[in-house]
Amino acid sequence: MATDTPAQNFRLLRKFIPSSLQPYLRGLRKRLQTSERPTQEPFRTVFPYTQVHRFRQENLLRIAREIDDRAIPGAIVECGVLDGGTAAIMAFGTKRSDRPLHLFDSWEGLPAATEKDGDAEMWAGDVVGSPRRVAAVLRALQISFSRVNFHKGWLTRHFQKQISTR
Ligand SMILES: C[S@@+](CC[C@H](N)C(=O)[O-])C[C@H]1O[C@@H](n2cnc3c(N)ncnc32)[C@H](O)[C@@H]1O
């Protein structure tokens, strides 16, 4: 059984915040952290749109660039997009090949916990992202929308179907 469920800040308050507001409040909170905002692109632009640590962002960019440098064929697939920060980094790093991006998310937060997830049920329906914010960060980094495919819904349902790539 999982024992490492992250603690939930403002647990009581969260119940009163409409889930549609979550992405905007999260973005606002990050925009207020001006002293932490990186100066280098694409990290500067994605800063309000990601929860992922800077080290991991740098690693993703390095891998994405290497995929293009080595002309490795295929599409970019992200499962768990939220507001699009890490998707935008991968798209930015593969601008040269202009390869397709397949973005999977419920955009309704985390699914119900199972018995394997320990006490994670408090997170069900939390961590709600926004496809509009995904589009905004991709636009800000001048990613061509002809590359982008949104797949909204639960991963368990999606992966029963085959993904068609261009
Ligand atoms: C930690 S966030 C992703 C972080 C994001 N990549 C970033 O740059 O900040 C996790 C996301 O995965 C999605 N998610 C988790 N489990 C899912 C599932 N089974 N089906 C669909 N979406 C899921 C949630 O809705 C949430 O948007």
Image (cartoon, helix red, strand yellow):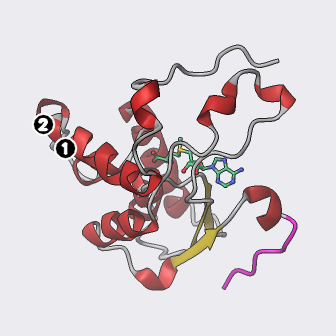
Q: Is residue 100 left or right of residue 95?
A: right
Q: Is 12 or 152 nearer to us in this picture? A: 12
Is 125 included in the stretch rendered in magenta? no
Pinpoint residue 2: horizontal percent, then vertical percent. 76, 19
Q: Is 111 or 162 nearer to us in this picture? A: 111
> Label 1 to label 2, Cα distance in Å?
6 Å
Task: Name the secondary structure under disc 1.
Answer: helix
Circle 1/circle 2 CB separation < 8 Å: yes
Q: Amino acid at mark 1?
A: Arg
Q: Amino acid at mark 2?
A: Thr
Q: Is 5 or 17 nearer to us in this picture? A: 17
Other residues around mark 1 within 10 Å, as few (<14) / some (14–19) / many (≥20):
some
Q: Is residue 100 visible?
A: no
Task: Name the secondary structure under disc 2.
Answer: helix
Can you identify the residue that label 2 sits on? Answer: 34
Can you identify the residue that label 1 sits on? Answer: 31
Quarter containing the N terminus? top right
Say above or below: 124 vs 46.
Answer: above
Pinpoint residue 128: horizontal percent, then vertical percent. 50, 50
Quarter containing the C terminus? bottom right
Majority SS type along the magenta span: loop
Q: Residue at x 44, y 61 (%)?
A: 130
Q: Residue at x 57, y 66 (%)?
A: 71
| Highlighted magenta segment, given as a residue range | 160-166
Pinpoint residue 75: horizontal percent, then vertical percent. 63, 69
Q: Is residue 34 left or right of residue 19?
A: left
